[in-house]
Amino acid sequence: MTNVTEGAGGLMGINDTDALTTLSLTNMTDNSLVVQGVTAGERTLTLNLNAFSDATVTDSEATGLVINSTGAGAGNDEDGELVAAAAVVAAKAESVSIAVTDTDAALDLDVATATALTVSGDASLTITDTDIAALETVTVSGSAGINVDLSSAAITNLNLSATSGDNTISDFDATTAEVAVTGGTGADDITV
């Protein structure tokens, strides 16, 4: 099984997924999905999220993660706090690529081993409640913008040069001896 498409549903599990490369989820709200591989190995999981809100996807074995978000917007709770559209847990992912189109989105990311994050598209992405401690490079392109707290990451390269979107980077540690920061043509608000 290499491709799975799922509409609205409740708790779902996919087992024996060593070959799973594409997972498309539409109209999922308040759900959890667990992808369980049998053996570890090099495998990139592509998540296509459409009208996806307040749900969690966990893949314990994927070494790469690609997220395509269309209409997976975020909302605000009763206190006005941003609620992420999705929580994605990929503990072994070495790289994460996120494309956000049509609708601004918010994601919780638990990608503790990922060293590279790439964001593209034409809408903005807010990354909340993160485990990105190994992250070294962040690259944003298109008219996408990113809003992220990088306090737990040891960034060596923050590249916003290919984006015209507005970017808000908070708690960025610029004391690393070899850190490169390149701004874009949008409004970049970088707090160190």
Image: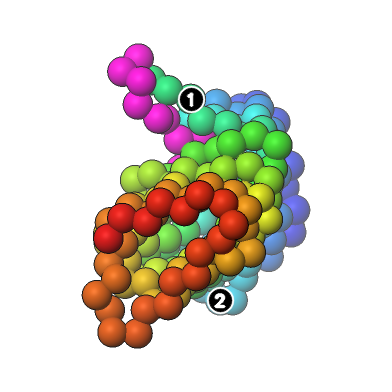
Of residues 107 and 163, which is closer to you in this image? 163
The image shows residue 96 at horizontal and vertical percentages of: 54, 63
**Which residues fall within the magenta stretch?**
78-88
Q: Quadrant of residue 21?
A: bottom right
* Residue plotted at (49% across, 39% down): 106
Q: Residues within 10 Å of mark 1 (few under 14, many from 20)?
A: some
Of residues 42 and 121, which is closer to you in this image? 121
| 26 displayed left or right of 140 | right
Residue 185 is one of the magenta-drawn residues: no
Q: Nearer the viewer, mark 1 or mark 2?
A: 1
* Residue plotted at (35% across, 85% down): 178
Vertical order, 32 against 10 (above or below)? below
The image shows residue 187 at horizontal and vertical percentages of: 50, 49
Distance from label 1 to label 2 (Cα)? Answer: 36 Å
The image shows residue 98 at horizontal and vertical percentages of: 60, 55
Amino acid at the residue labelled 1: Gly
- Asked whether residue 131 appears in the rendered view, the answer is no
Q: Residues within 10 Å of mark 2 (few under 14, many from 20)?
A: few
- In the rendered image, the quadrant that contains the N terminus is bottom right
Mark 1 lies on residue:
75
Residue 86 is one of the magenta-drawn residues: yes
Mark 2 lies on residue:
41
Vertical order, 92 against 11 (above or below)? below
Q: For the residue labelled by badge 1, is the local secondary structure a helix, a strand or a loop? A: strand
- Asked whether residue 171 appears in the rendered view, the answer is yes
* Residue plotted at (35% across, 26% down): 81
Amino acid at the residue labelled 2: Gly
* Residue plotted at (37% across, 79% down): 179
The image shows residue 175 at horizontal and vertical percentages of: 24, 75
Q: Quadrant of residue 180?
A: bottom left
Of residues 176 and 63, which is closer to you in this image? 176
Vertical order, 6 against 183 (above or below)? above
